[in-house]
Image: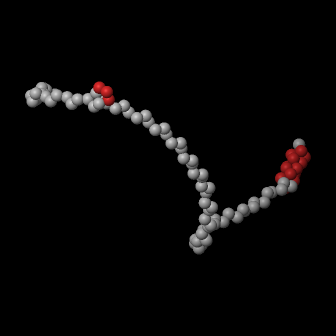
Amino acid sequence: MNKTLLMSAMLATLTLAACDKPTVVNVPATPVAVPGPAGPQGETGNQGATGYQGNTGSQGETGNTGATGYTGNEGVQGETGATGKTGDGTTVIVVPTETAPVN
């Protein structure tokens, strides 16, 4: 049993010694870009082309002339009618009724 135990210990030692240990690689930190001062202003751009102007519309048609109105009633044989009688001179005054105040 001693040989088996000794053999197992040697085999474990060789197995662990033969392992490749990974190398630790330090990745450098990404540098942070710091903006510098503003540069001079650029040139002004060209002005754009003027848009298309639409056509002027055509004039509409003139409307029809209305019919002439009728003249007032005329007297016999196309003469002007007689003037009406004047009143008798009585004046009538209508007084409005009083209304109750609204609460």
Q: Describe residue 66's horizontal placement relative to residue 43 as left or right.
A: left
- Quadrant location, the N terminus: top right
Question: Tell me, what colour scheme is on the image?
Answer: secondary structure
Which of the pair 46/11 is nearer the observer? 46
Residue in the picture at 89% in, 45% down: 4
Q: Is residue 53 left or right of residue 18?
A: left
Q: Is residue 73 left or right of residue 32?
A: left
Front residue (pair 8, 91):
91
Give the mark count.
0
Judge by depth and name the residue closer to the eye, 37 or 9. 37
Tell me, yes or no, if residue 54 can be seen here: yes
Residue beneath the point at 60% across and 60% down: 50
Q: Position of residue 69 (x, y in %)?
A: 38, 33
Image location (x, y in percent) of residue 9 = 85, 49
Q: Is residue 78 above or below residue 30?
A: above
Q: Note whether 97 is above or below 3 in the view shown.
A: above
Residue at the far bottom: name it. Answer: 40
Residue situated in front as seen by the camera: 43 or 53: 53
The residue sitting at 13% across, 28% down in the picture is 87
Q: Is residue 7 left or right of residue 96?
A: right
For the question of whether residue 95 can be seen, the reply is no
Q: Quadrant of the C terminus?
A: top left
Quadrant location of residue 28?
bottom right
- Residue drawn at the location 62% of the way across and 62% of the way down: 48
Q: Residue furthest left?
A: 90
The percent position of residue 74, horizontal first and vertical second, equals 30, 29
Name the outermost residue toward the front.
77
